[in-house]
Each structure stands twice: as structure tokens, then as C-alpha cells.
Amino acid sequence: MSSTGDDAVFEVVWPLGKIAKVSIPARLGVDDLSGKTVGMLTNSLHRGEEIFDIVRQSLRKHYAGIQFREFHLPRGWDEYEYLAKLPEELRAGKCDAVITGMGGGAGCALSFVRASMAAEKAGIPSVTLLASAFLKSGETLAQSMGMKKLAIAEYPGVSVMDSDELLRTKVQDKVVAGIVDGIATASDPSIPPQEP
């Protein structure tokens, strides 16, 4: 602080970090998944494989000829090396869209958001499946990586605490609709303004 007479002058610092400037292409959504190939990326935690089995069954009932490609997200430092190659793997698998999840813990949630961002940067529509508790952290990470609104499908509650029957009901009644809506929605890659 410096002062001249009765006028005080304060120097302040912007409390938020700088927003990353990342080139993310705008893209159209995929309205009809019939005949499309959807990548499914999980890491075997938080009942992700069970949830994806139910998602596959549900989508096959509604979309003729839909196909799926399985991908496994490693944990730890290997994740970053894998994510650098993910767009190439999705293209090699001829994926029209990708679903990442199940983000049922803080580390997993953020890992799947990073995976969806890697797909979006490559122009491949994505939707991230996150438990309710991690929606805000997922949105915040996507914004810090340069995307105003990443498509996120909510798993209501905590998947590891739910019975098999309740898990199936939640996936069929809520999660599948969130996934379809997320894939069908055009991306909005614009980011908030820089610091003043």
C-alpha cells in the first residue's frame, strides 16, 4: 500500500489463475447413434464396467447397428502418456463419440474429464459420467482447460453404495438419457474472459 495524504492506493492481485488458451474445435453433436461407433473408456473403478454394460444394453435397444469400442484408462503417471495417444486410438477405432467414466471419486472424476477433453480437442464428441458429488469439480476442470461447458452425465448418488437393482434403475432412468443428450449437444468451447 502506498499513501499520499488521505488517498490510500492498494495494489491487488487477481485471485484466480490464468485460464489456459487451448484450441478446442467447435463441433456438432451426434443426433442419431444408429450405425455409429461409441468408445467407452473406464478404469474398472466405481462399478464403471457394470454401468457401461447397462448403458450398452440400453443404447442397443434404441439405436440399430450401434457398435462399441472398449478403452481402459490407466491410473497414475501412465494416464498422461495414455491421454496423449487417446485421440489417435479413438480415430483408429473409428469412434464417432466417446463416453468416459465412472468418476465416482475425486481422482477418477478429474481423470475422466481430462480424457473427454483429449477427445474434444480432437473433434470427437464426448460425455463424462460423474457421480453427483463431483459435478462441480468436473465442470471447473473443463473450464480451466478451455471448455465452457463439457457434456457431463450425472450418476445420482454413490454407485458403490447402491444395490445392483438400484444401480440398474439409475443408469436406465437417468444416466443413459444424460449420455444421449451429451453426445447430441453441440460443443461450446468458448472460455470465460481473462483476468481484468
Image (cartoon, grey):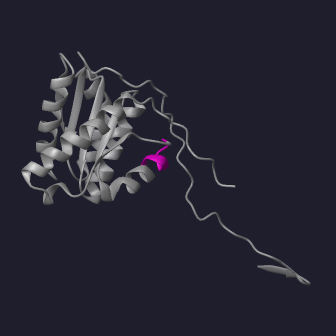
Q: Is residue 190 left or right of residue 14?
A: left
Q: Is residue 106 above or below residue 127?
A: below
* Front position in the image: 158 or 113: 158
Can residue 42 be seen at all in this image of the molecule?
no
Q: Position of residue 119 (x, y in %)?
A: 35, 33
Q: Kindly indicate the quadrant of the structure image that contains residue 114.
A: top left
Q: Is residue 146 magenta?
A: yes
Q: Position of residue 10 (x, y in %)?
A: 76, 74
Q: Is residue 128 above or below residue 131?
A: above
For the view shown, which residue lies furthest in the left direction? 164
Q: Kindly indicate the quadrant of the structure image that contains residue 173.
A: top left
Q: Is residue 51 above or below residue 120?
A: below
Q: Position of residue 78 (x, y in %)?
A: 23, 47
Q: Is residue 28 left or right of residue 126?
A: right
Q: Which quadrant, please, contains the N terminus?
A: bottom right
Q: Is residue 113 magenta?
A: no
Residue at the (23%, 30%) spot, across then down: 39
Can residue 1 be seen at all in this image of the molecule?
yes
For the view shown, which residue lies furthest in the right direction? 5
- Chain part drawn in magenta: 142-147
Total number of numbered discs in the rendering: 0
Q: Which quadrant, please, contains the C terminus?
A: bottom right
Q: Position of residue 185 (x, y in %)?
A: 41, 30
Residue at the (23%, 55%) spot, across then down: 104
* Front position in the image: 96 or 20: 96
Q: Kindly indicate the quadrant of the structure image that contains residue 137.
A: bottom left
Residue at the (45%, 29%) spot, across then down: 186
* Front position in the image: 38 or 170: 170
Residue at the (21%, 34%) spot, across then down: 40
